[in-house]
Amino acid sequence: MTARARSFGGAADAYDRLRPAPVPEALRWLVPSPDATVLDLGAGTGLLTRALAAEGVADVVAVEPDEAMRAVLAARSPGAPALAGSAEQVPLPDASVDAVLVASAWHWFDPERATAEIARVLRPGGTLGLLWSFPDPAQEWVSQLRAIAHTDDAGKPGPTAGFEIALPAGAPFSVGESEVFRASTWMAVDDVAGMLGTYSTVLTLPADERAEVRRRALAHVAHHVGTDPVLVPFATAAWRAIRT
């Protein structure tokens, strides 16, 4: 993993508290049935694992390589197994799950090795679902806020439906399809600024530059939106394909 991929563990508590959970409609679109066995791959602190539980999906296994992130997951999602592992080495048997969901992590994976492992653990007809949840740049003030932290990284889809994910040649999956789902959440101004500090582009900055990002974010929100609380628009970009 790159230094940026390894940066999240040091901010695991803030990540879990401030990052957006997936929009519920996106999960209903991705998961074939509440009775499905779902692998949350690259699970982080368990935001997706808990969101699935809230949607009635009881059989969820989380796999996360970072020990600090996994510790938060285990503490806050006590009903879900939290296994050490990676997308390139999934600690599950062949054909053991109905869906593999990857939330805001696919761009960190080795696509060749991860796709092969996902195909191995998925049952035929199972779903591979990739999703990214982020402050919605369709609103100008949010787009400007994201620019402060340079969060628009290559490899992540934008907020428009119809985006494509290219799997490795010969991967045993159907042609993918995508949608974007939206919702809004009230947040304190301080938490909006804190959320920016959980992105790898900020986490890997020197301390003084991280402080400057926070100062600029607070000033931006106060100027463009006003005082607490702030209604923050979020989007979940979701893509799915079927294991053939």
Image (cartoon, helix red, strand yellow):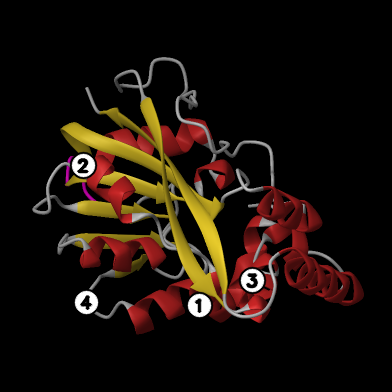
Q: Give the spatial CA distance, label 4 vs label 3.
A: 29 Å
In the structure shown, which secondary structural element does the residue marked by tag 4 occupy? loop
* Label 1 crowd (10 A; few <14 / some 14-19 / many >=20): some
Residue 177 in the figure: left or right of residue 99: right
Q: Earlier in the sequence, mark 2 or mark 4?
A: 4
In the structure shown, which secondary structural element does the residue marked by tag 3 occupy? helix
The circle on residue 66 is none
**Front: mark 3 or 2:** 3
Kind of residue at disc 2: Asp
Pointer 3 residue:
192
The circle on residue 79 is 4
Q: Position of residue 205 (x, y in %)?
A: 83, 65
Q: Earlier in the sequence, mark 1 or mark 3?
A: 1
Q: Earlier in the sequence, mark 1 or mark 2?
A: 1
Write down the region rendered in magenta. 91-96
Q: Is residue 47 visible?
A: yes
In the structure shown, which secondary structural element does the residue marked by tag 2 occupy? loop
* Secondary structure predominantly adopted by residues drawn in magenta: loop
**Front: mark 4 or 3:** 3
Kind of residue at disc 4: Gly
Residue 11 in the figure: left or right of residue 145: left
Q: Quadrant of the C terminus?
A: top left
Which residue sits at x=84%, y=68%? 216
Q: Give the spatial CA distance, label 1 vs label 4.
A: 19 Å
**Front: mark 1 or 2:** 1
Q: Earlier in the sequence, mark 3 or mark 2?
A: 2
Kind of residue at disc 3: Val
